[in-house]
Amino acid sequence: MIEIEIYEPVFQFLGGIFHQDIETPESALAEYLEEIPKEEQKTDIVALKDFINSDYSDEEKNDFIDEAADGVDILSYDVSPIIWLEQVIQKIEKNIETL
């Protein structure tokens, strides 16, 4: 089981942004990038990277991401959930760099 310190902020991010009621994952991310202050985005990146770099197995991480981001059909992206989340992180980082 993934620790609550790692679990909670990542689950809140994934479940809050990529829930079942979104139109598309891309539109949900675009809305997040537009509406969430960049300081909060930076905080989210730290939590997401801590999760990615944690000692949990890839299987545990993939299962967690797949469950938390229940509005995303990650298999349709032809990447693992971890790779998909890394791509999301890169898009957030790119957004933060632009002023």
Image: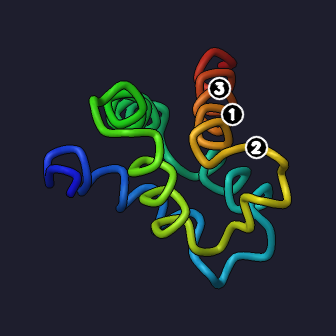
Q: Where 5 falls versus 70 (above or below)?
A: above
Mark 1: few/some/many CA within 10 Å (<14, 14-19, 20+): few
Proximity of marks 1 and 3: CB atoms separated by less than 8 Å: yes
Picture quarter with the C terminus: top right
Q: Secondary structure at mark 2?
A: loop
Instruction: Write down the residue under mark 3.
Output: 90
Mark 2: few/some/many CA within 10 Å (<14, 14-19, 20+): few
Mark seen at residue 79: 2
Mark seen at residue 31: none
Picture quarter with the N terminus: bottom left
Considering depth in this image, is 34 or 51 the residue closer to the camera?
51
Pair 2/1: label in front: 2
Which residue is rendered at x = 14% and y = 54% of the image?
4
Q: Where 77 falls versus 71 (above or below)?
A: above
Proximity of marks 2 and 1: CB atoms separated by less than 8 Å: yes
Q: How is the image coloured?
A: rainbow
Mark seen at residue 87: 1
Distance between the alpha carbons at the discs numbered 1 and 3: 5 Å
